[in-house]
Image (cartoon, helix red, strand yellow):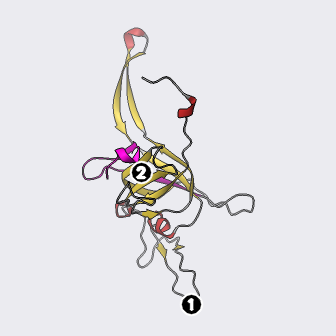
Amino acid sequence: MASPNVRNILRLPGRLVAAPTNLLAAYPHGGVELGVVRDVEFRPGIKTSLVTAEEYGGVVTEAIYAGEAPILACVLRSFDNDLIQRLFLNTSVPVVSGASGDRIILGRASGAGVNRAGTLRDASAIVLLFTPKNVDMHPMVLIRRAIPMVEETAALALSLSQELGLGLVFYCAPDSSGRTYDVGKRQDLTL
């Protein structure tokens, strides 16, 4: 085991990529860039059940691994059309003359072609990669099947004093092989 060294402390600025095809290729690794993000956090969500001994006053005598519920959370700092389309169930592209071409987020409870409450989100799942700026020295996070969602308490700051940001959560669901995520250096990971 190596001795602790402060030079090994990491700061990991990075970016998100959807559907990477070659981790050894330059950014975006054959995939699609997903806007500008900040405050990216990967949470493994490891769950543990504790076994206590009543005869010893309830002291913990064993711990049982009870699975994981991993997520990747971040704040979207820009409106990226590819990501907006996956985050929100109801969007459209304006067809009026002189339109920007950017997606419109549609708040709809019902109507023709509207995705209503109870709609499954699996169709929006993607392979998601957090790729650090220093791809050769810092670890990547590869999520095998990420279901993108707007964080339930997210709010758009419509203010001059704060930048616009939208809280996102990517739930890590198992792929067809039962894999959820890998964390490691790019030369050690496989798609």
Q: Which mark is residue 142?
A: none
Q: Which mark is residue 171?
A: 2
Residue 49 appears left or right of 161: left
Q: Is residue 176 magenta?
A: yes
What residue would you read off at disc 1? 97
Q: Quadrant of the N terminus?
A: top left
Q: Which residues are magenta?
A: 166-191
The alpha-carbon separation of the residues under discs 2 and 1 comes to: 38 Å
**In the image shown, does 118 or 80 lie closer to the viewer?**
80
The crowding category of the residue bearing disc 1, from other C-alpha atoms within 10 Å (few below 14, some 14 to 19, many at least 20), is few
Q: Is residue 58 magenta?
A: no
* Quarter occupied by residue 158: bottom right
Residue 76 in the image, given as x and y percentages of width and height: 56, 58
Residue at x 39%, y 30% (from the top left corner): 48
Secondary structure of the residue carrying tag 2 is strand
Residue at x 41%, y 70% (from the top left corner): 115
Q: Name which residue type carries label 1.
A: Ser
In the displayed structure, 127 sits above or below 81; it is above
Q: Name which residue type carries label 2.
A: Tyr
**In the image shown, does 4 or 94 lie closer to the viewer?**
4
Residue 177 in the image, given as x and y percentages of width and height: 24, 49
